[in-house]
Each structure stands twice: as structure tokens, then as C-alpha cells.
């Protein structure tokens, strides 16, 4: 009987306990509140579904357009990069489980794209914009680690304290 109990416990641990990259401890579900074009790219606002906390990030125009198309379920005549990636995943039996914006390091947001196929799960490091563009095509939820909200607030405060310097001239 002891062997059976040990086997069941081991099977539970292997099959049911999430991987470190999949844990939702401290992660907050967010929704895309706004996509706003700027001269430098697209400003995307993600707001918590359970509070008024939000984060803002600047992404490329192409990724912003891809996210907007996914939100509106619009297709193009020819597949764009994120559509092609979805086709490859679909053909090989994978789906997107979730997107996790896990960290903000030196002003750069870091994300994980979690894929699943049957009972197999794989977590990939990804740019948040790409992860969201792909995840939205599957209706996957987007999560942000709680510390990212604090990290962004700290970054914004530090930027306010730094006075802009004169732009450097490029010398050829």
C-alpha cells in the first residue's frame, strides 16, 4: 500500500503542480484598456481586472496593429507573422494557455508565453507585445506579476527626477 501511495503522490506532483514559469502566485489578470499610437510606437495600457492598477508600455507599430487585429478578430488577405505562428502551433497541436508579463528589468518588460498540448506544457521567453499578439488569437488570458506594477511606478519616479540632457550630436 505504501508503494501505491508514493506512486500516486509522485504522479500528482509531476502532473498537477505547475512549473515555476506557470505559477500565478502574485500574478494579476489584466485586460488591454487602450492602444494609442504615438510618434515613437504604440502605447498600450493594461489594467487589472480586479483593481485600478495599470501598466503602460511602448510597443512597435507592427505589434500594435497585430494586437488590434486580434482584438477585433480581423484577418488580412495574407497571413502576418503572428497569424503564421498561430498556424504552425495549430498544425502541431499546441494552444496558448496564458501570457505572463513577469518582470521589468532596466526599463524592458519581460514576458512568458505558455503553450500546452495535451498534458504537456512549455514556457517560452517572449517580448510582451509578441506574446499578447499570439495569445489574443487564442483567447488566452494575460497576467502581470504584482511586482511589475511597483517596478513601473519606481521607474516613473526615477525618470521624473532625472533632468533631460542635451542631445548628443552624431559624428561621422
Image (spheres, rainbow, N blue to C red):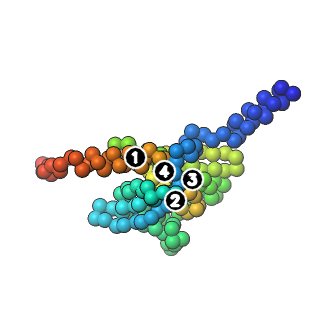
Mark in front: 3 vs 4: 4
Mark toward the start of the polypeptide (1 vs 2): 2
Mark 1 packing: few (<14 Cα in 10 Å), some, or many (20+)? some
Residue 150 got which mark? 1
Which percent across, then down, holds residue 60? 37, 59
Disc 1 + disc 2, Cβ < 8 Å: no
Which percent across, then down, holds residue 77? 50, 73
Q: What distance separates the C-alpha of mark 1 from that of mark 4?
A: 11 Å
What is the secondary structure assignment of the residue under circle 4? strand
Mark in front: 1 vs 4: 1
Residue 49 got which mark? 2
Q: Residue at x 41, y 60 (%)?
A: 45
Q: Is residue 160 left or right of residue 69?
A: left
What is the secondary structure assignment of the residue under circle 2? loop
Mark toward the start of the polypeptide (4 vs 2): 2
Residue at image mark 4: 144
Amino acid at each position: 500500500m505504501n508503494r501505491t501511495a508514493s506512486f500516486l503522490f509522485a504522479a500528482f506532483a509531476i502532473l498537477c503542480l505547475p512549473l515555476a514559469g506557470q505559477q500565478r502566485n502574485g500574478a494579476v489578470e489584466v485586460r488591454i484598456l487602450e492602444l494609442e499610437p504615438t510618434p515613437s510606437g504604440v502605447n498600450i495600457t493594461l489594467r487589472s481586472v480586479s483593481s485600478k492598477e495599470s501598466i503602460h508600455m511602448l510597443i512597435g507599430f507592427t505589434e500594435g496593429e497585430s494586437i488590434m487585429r486580434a482584438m477585433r478578430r480581423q484577418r488580412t488577405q495574407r497571413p502576418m507573422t503572428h497569424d503564421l505562428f498561430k498556424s504552425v502551433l495549430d498544425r502541431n497541436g499546441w494552444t496558448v494557455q496564458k501570457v505572463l508579463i513577469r518582470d521589468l528589468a532596466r526599463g524592458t518588460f519581460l514576458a512568458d508565453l505558455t503553450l500546452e498540448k495535451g498534458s504537456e506544457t512549455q514556457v517560452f521567453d517572449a517580448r510582451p507585445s509578441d506574446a499578447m499578439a499570439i495569445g489574443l488569437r487564442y483567447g488566452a488570458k494575460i497576467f502581470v506579476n504584482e511586482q511589475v506594477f511597483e517596478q513601473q511606478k519606481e521607474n516613473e519616479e526615477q525618470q521624473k527626477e532625472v533632468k533631460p540632457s542635451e542631445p548628443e550630436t552624431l559624428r561621422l
